[in-house]
Amino acid sequence: MAIASPSPVPSAAAAAPAATPAAAPRTSAPRPQLTDAQFQKFATMVYDLSGMRFEANKSYFLASKLDNRVQALGLKGFDAYLTYLDSPSGRAEYGFLVDEITINETFFFRHEPQLQAFRDEILMPLVFARRAQRQLKFRIWSAASSTGDELYTIALMLKDLGLIGKDLQFELVGTDICHDALAKARAGVYRKYNIRNVPPALLQQYFVHDAGTSTGSVGTETWALKPEVKSLCRFQEGNLTDAARTGALGKFDIIFCRNVLIYFDEASKEKVVKNMVGNMVDDGFTLLGHSENIYGQRHLLKPDKTHSAAIAYTKAPPGTPKYNV
Ligand SMILES: C[S@@+](CC[C@H](N)C(=O)[O-])C[C@H]1O[C@@H](n2cnc3c(N)ncnc32)[C@H](O)[C@@H]1O
């Protein structure tokens, strides 16, 4: 499902009333709560939009996220929000809803043992193979790129290996369903939390540090990626459950799909993995996060046991039986 890009509306913070005078007693607002019927409606909507499955034990989480939208829109409550979403003018709201409920946790050089194994055992052999085949286009996809940390990490690794500007032409594509995250990815400006694992030499060479003291405010220290790295990466909206949109991205030599399948149920995983296999060249690899399992999709992707630290998968041979999970 394509989701309309959200247009700016006042944020929850902007819509909040002025701060209470210091002397006034503090009354904490009641925790927003969804009725069972409201939870079912929203959970189904989120599932249809993104493939993410929220079980009943996540009702409080969903309520607090949805409440941000209710407040931002100045609505009376969750029923009013449902009515708004159902109205013709509510269509653009789907993008805000998705932005609100996605979890964009990511950082540079996330899970380094996997990245080292990827570099030495997957990337470099594939680079040599492509040179031997005289196939000089090399495409890498970060399939749930969030704020871009993962794709830029790959770009930094390629730079560090001296592979950029040589014979192979690398195309690095990041897609995500969350517009906020994509905007941050395109901006390429990060806080300390995100860059904490970047090796110092790479940090020094490819980022511009702003100590944040020029404005006098505390906690505004940033690291901005230099254009020579940013220009290697392209980010666009993409819903992994949408076969037509993912298909249009074309084939990739390597796909990173880390830390997103954990939010999907079996039916969504089946759809997403099937789509991704359609995006892999025949000798390509897909890398998953270390806590993700796709036992139910082994008929589509086969674990690459030779390079187990890379958590890599190749296309399953045709006729591989589907396991019941
Ligand atoms: C936890 S982040 C993972 C980021 C990065 N891959 C990493 O491992 O560091 C998960 C991302 O998946 C995105 N996402 C969730 N459902 C999606 C879908 N159906 N299609 C595309 N992206 C999705 C979220 O917006 C979020 O940015």
Image (cartoon, rainbow, N blue to C red):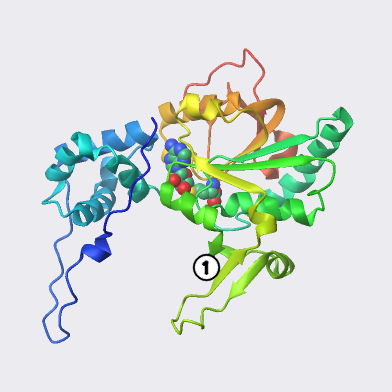
Q: Is residue 104 above or below residue 202?
A: above
Q: Secondary structure under badge 1?
A: loop
Q: Please, what is the three-letter code of the amino acid marked with disc 1?
A: Arg
Residue 106 visible from this viewpoint: no
Residue found at the far right of this picture:
132
Residue found at the far bottom of this picture:
23
Which residue is rendered at x = 27% and y = 45% of the image? 57
Instruction: Name the image quarter holding residue 46.
Output: top left
Residue 257 relative to residue 39: left or right:
right
Residue 214: % across, % down: 51, 83
Residue 13 relative to residue 312: left or right:
left
Q: Which is more toward the observer, 86 or 317?
A: 86
Q: Give the labeled residue for mark 1.
A: 191
Image quarter where the N terminus lies is top left
Count of numbered marks: 1
Which residue is rendered at x = 57% and y = 16% of the image? 321
Residue 149: % across, % down: 57, 55
Q: Is residue 169 above or below residue 268?
A: below
Residue 17 relative to residue 272: left or right:
left
Q: Which is more toward the observer, 60 or 324?
A: 60
Residue 28: % across, % down: 15, 69
Which residue is rendered at x = 60% and y = 58% of the image? 108
Confirm if mark 1 falls within 8 A of ligand 1. no
Residue 144 visible from this viewpoint: yes
- Residue density around tag 1, few if under 14, some if 14–19, many if 20 or more, within 10 Å: some
Instruction: Name the image quarter holding residue 304.
Output: top right
Residue 48: % across, % down: 33, 31
